[in-house]
Image: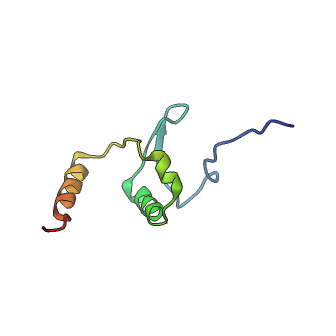
Amino acid sequence: MSATHLRIYDGPPNATGGVDGTCSGSVRQSCTVPLVDILPLLADAVQSERTWLGDFEDDEITISMDLYEVILAYQHFRRPSA
């Protein structure tokens, strides 16, 4: 039986119209991606209940303080009234 070799799919070469980010490190440990590029994809994945989202539920992300404050305010005001 021959050994199976797995590869990581990085998308089509020279893709246009996709997520455009800046990745660092030779093994690509992190990427900086504009929120406008990734948010619609994540929203669709959540709405479609994609199981792969669970693989990343413990990952941490870095966001700007402005966005963090807006999210906190949104969280506060969307609470159902008693």
Residue 80 placement: quadrant:
bottom left
Q: Residue furthest right?
A: 1
Furthest toward the bottom, the residue is: 81
Q: Quadrant of the C terminus?
A: bottom left
Q: Quadrant of the N terminus?
A: top right
Residue 79, quarter of the rendered image = bottom left
Give me the residue at 20% from left, 54% from top. 72
Residue 56 at least partly seen: yes
Outermost residue toward the front?
Answer: 82
Judged left or right of residue 60, residue 17 is: right
Q: Position of residue 24 (x, y in %)?
A: 47, 35
Front residue of 16 and 62: 62
Residue 15's spot in the image, x, y percent?
59, 56
Residue at screen point 52% across, 36% down: 28
58 versus 38 height, above or below: above
Answer with left or right where residue 64 lies relative to residue 25.
left
Q: Is residue 20 visible?
A: no
On the image, the x and y values in percent for residue 65 come to 22, 46
Q: Position of residue 36 (x, y in %)?
A: 38, 59
Q: Total label count? A: 0
Colouring scheme applied when the structure was drawn? rainbow
Give the left or right position of residue 60, taking residue 17 as reference.
left
Between 75 and 41, the one lying in front of the other is 75
| Direction top: furthest residue | 26
Seen in the image, is 11 located left or right of residue 75?
A: right
| Residue at 17 percent of width and 57 percent of height | 73
